[in-house]
Amino acid sequence: MASLSLLRQTHFISATLPTRPKPKYASPPGRVQMSLQQNAPTIAVVGVTGAVGQEFLSVLSDRDFPYSSIKMLASKRSAGRHLTFENKDYVVEELTAESFNGVDIALFSAGGSISKKFGPIAVDRGTIVVDNSSAFRMDENVPLVIPEVNPEAMKNIKVGMGKGALIANPNCSTIICLMAATPLHRRAKVLRMVVSTYQAASGAGAAAMEELELQTREVLEGKPPTCNIFNRQYAFNLFSHNAPVLPNGYNEEEMKLVKETRKIWNDKDVKVTATCIRVPVMRAHAESVNLQFENPLDEDTAREILKNAPGVVVIDDRESNNFPTPLEVSNKDDVAVGRIRRDLSQDGNQGLDIFICGDQIRKGAALNAIQIAELLL
């Protein structure tokens, strides 16, 4: 499990590492705790000891999400651990089929195989599952939702409707990309989108974050780096995303961007191509996006559209050469966009280039899932 200090870290890794406190999500002094309420939904967090599971707890607390009870669920290996959440001690329970009895909302982030096994079980027991894995994203019967983009996809699913349901969280790269691309798509209709991603360690989980931290120290000390997660040096290096490469030459991460964009936009004709790269950053992704439009859209209008888009902040200062960075968006809810400029390779105002950064664990995973859960209330 990644430590709280590691998950909250917003600077590049130093050789002197912080101590690792027991994870706590306590209400700040003087704050009235509003989230624990008698008549609120019951919640379960599946994969609570992982990087995204830990962030689920942080976001639930930050947003005062109402709950009457919460179950902390993980593998048999993690069962018995203690977590402090909002000033109360919880014991992590082993995930079983019986875990979902009486649970209204289950937040899943324990990998695709766990979701495929336990997601339908939870639904059969009346639980609404918000799943962070890729298990159900392309199932035509499962909504794939970014609340700022397509909330209508889940409009008929609510707590108290008397039956369970599945809702899929998109891939982190898709969420971060579409947060900025969608407001422009609504105005001018995107015909083609070319995406290059620069993806952080957090996308591969807590163990990858730990290994990047360890490798950095080892390299600085002149030692051979420990290479268990990616089987190559990650510190001070970058490489093609570690997802399996498909027969068409794209890897699975790249094809997620292609397929998920089409589903979320409900547009089978939009052309999307992507190249995904893993970079030695702890927890925030960056993406270079080129857009080709059906209708003209000039850069000044695009900038104003993005300034008014929910969940988006514009950092686009050409004079001081100040644009989004992973560092600035780490631990932040908003996705940052900059480098907004006309694509000179296209005629007129038919294309734009933009650069996007977003926290992969937060908006790319946990925050998006909690926002989905808020729509269920």
Image (cartoon, helix red, strand yellow):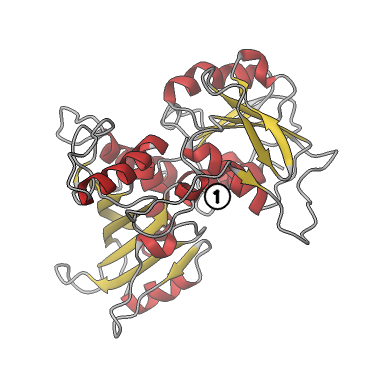
Residue at image point 75% right, 36% down? 41
Judging by the rendered image, the residue that carries numbered circle 1 is 147
Q: Is residue 368 above or below residue 205?
A: below
Q: Position of residue 262 (x, y in %)?
A: 36, 43
Q: Residues within 10 Å of mark 1 (few under 14, many from 20)?
A: many
Mark 1 lies on a secondary structure that is loop
Residue at image point 69% right, 49% down? 26
Instruction: Name the side, left or right, on which 265 lies relative to 56.
Output: left
The residue lying furthest to the top in this view is 97
Quadrant of residue 330 in the image?
bottom left
Q: Closest to the observer: 56 or 115?
A: 56
Residue at image point 49% right, 40% down? 52
Q: Label 1 amino acid?
A: Pro
Residue at image point 72% right, 19% down? 101
State whether residue 29 appears in this view. Answer: yes
Q: Closest to the observer: 297 or 47?
A: 47
Q: Is residue 197 above or below residue 321?
A: above
Q: Is residue 320 above or below residue 267?
A: below
Q: Position of residue 49 (x, y in %)?
A: 53, 33
Quadrant of residue 157 in the image?
top right
Quadrant of residue 224 in the image?
top left
Q: Position of residue 6 (x, y in %)?
A: 45, 48
Q: Is residue 159 above or below residue 305?
A: above
Instruction: Name the side, left or right, on which 3 lies relative to 157.
Output: left
Q: Quadrant of the C terminus?
A: top right
